[in-house]
Image (cartoon, rainbow, N blue to C red):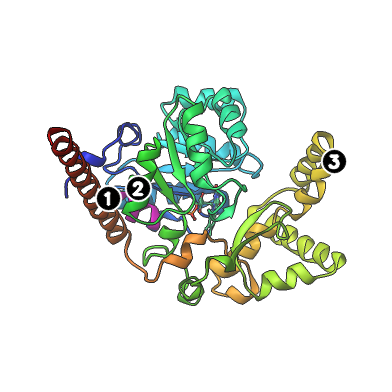
Amino acid sequence: MSALPLRTPLCDLLGCRYPVVQTAMGWVAGPELVAATTNAGGFGFLAGATIAAERIEADILRVKQLTGDAPFGLNFHMFQPNAQQLLDLAVKHKIRAVSYGRGPDKKVIRRLRDAGIVCMPTVGALKHAQKAIEMGANVITIQGGEGGGHTGSVPTTVLLPQVVDAVKVPVVAAGGFYDGRGLVAALAFGAQGIAMGTRFLMTRDSGVPEVTLQRYLDVRDADRIRVSPVVDGMPQRMIDNEYLAMLEKAAPLRRVWIALQSALQWKAQTGMTTRHALGVLWQALREDPATVAQTVMAANAPVLLQRSMVEGKPAEGVMSSGQVAALIGELKSCREVIDGIVTQAGERLSALSALSALSSSTATQESNS
Ligand SMILES: Cc1cc2nc3c(=O)[nH]c(=O)nc-3n(C[C@H](O)[C@H](O)[C@H](O)COP(=O)(O)O)c2cc1C
């Protein structure tokens, strides 16, 4: 399969064949999915925020083993208790790129950049892109509001040109992509590639239990994949299910109870010390007291996602998803997804150049007549 027409400088920066990125997804983007993406010519990010501290290095080595040491990425959040461990591992194992949201400071980013690591945060607003670049990021992934998980309100078609016009670093487009038409459209907007979460979740390589994947396949109406702040206080796009409806109707006390249970479970799972938990809370209080409720609820997102993505109990948890799930009717392998995107993108590009040849020959005929 020819890669040439689709090759962008991003491919050289990330060391992949096609400008197609599999984003980090908590509990979903494990070594198998990352390796399947990478082996198919894309670039996969390991979801470091939901991998147990004692397993993370083994998972990094597993990707290396499954891919024959091909480049891949690591996602982390600065507020996770083992953030420092992930940063050290990224440097130790010469991870090609890291992705993050609200981010590390200049010193941390300088350390990563000095180690040759591409710093590639995901942002949902122009001002966040500008701030991230000021802090040292050298690639920006924009995520339009239609994207899955935590998301902003500006759609991809507005955010992408806005950021492309305002920044000098390569921009990758996320939020709503699943096929070759989307890749060509993103490149036409000036992006250097696309990044997809939901499309890769809905593959046979994601390891998500069948009963949960069936819920994704059953959604045919994009309106049923909606944004709610009820899980952790921040807007998050999810499939509308019985658990989300319950959370939205629940009395405040019940919500506090659920958040506390999640916090305790998450504390035990991550080995977070009480001191670290109190430190995070104290920092939230000092920086912005309005975010204290969010800090208490923060564990809801990984714990409730785990129920659907790992335990196979989609009715008892949340299902983060982009609206694009409504357009995806079948599970494929990562290779089929990427090959399909590349083939369709090539077809669209040929159709567009045939169209432009036709219109220029019509214009010549008209000017000669
Ligand atoms: C199930 C799920 C889990 C996610 N978890 C994370 C995460 O842990 N860290 C992160 O930065 N983004 C996370 N996201 C957001 C994705 O990385 C990605 O930016 C988004 O899915 C792109 O939009 P799309 O789904 O329309 O492709 C998650 C998305 C989904 C669907």
Instruction: Classify mark 2: helix, strand or loop.
Output: helix
- Residue 289's label in the rendered image is 3
Which residue is more in the foreground, 361 or 181?
A: 361
Residue at the image position 48 percent from the left and 29 percent from the top: 165
Give the foreground label among 1 and 3. 1
Confirm whether the magenta stretch covers residue 35.
yes
Q: Secondary structure at mark 3?
A: helix
**Residue farthest along the right direction in this orientation:** 253
Residue kind at label 2, given as amino acid type: Leu
Q: Is residue 97 above or below residue 30?
A: above
Magenta-highlighted residues: 33-40
Per the image, the residue denoted by label 1 is 345
Quarter of the picture holding the C terminus: top left
Q: Which residue was labeled with disc 2?
A: 183
Q: Amino acid at mark 1?
A: Ala
Report the side of 19 relative to 144 (left or right).
left
Instruction: Tell me, for residue 29, which label it has, or none.
Output: none
**Percent x, y for residue 358?**
17, 44
Residue 276 image offset from top left, x and y in percent: 74, 43
Q: Who is closer to the viewer here, 349 or 207?
A: 349
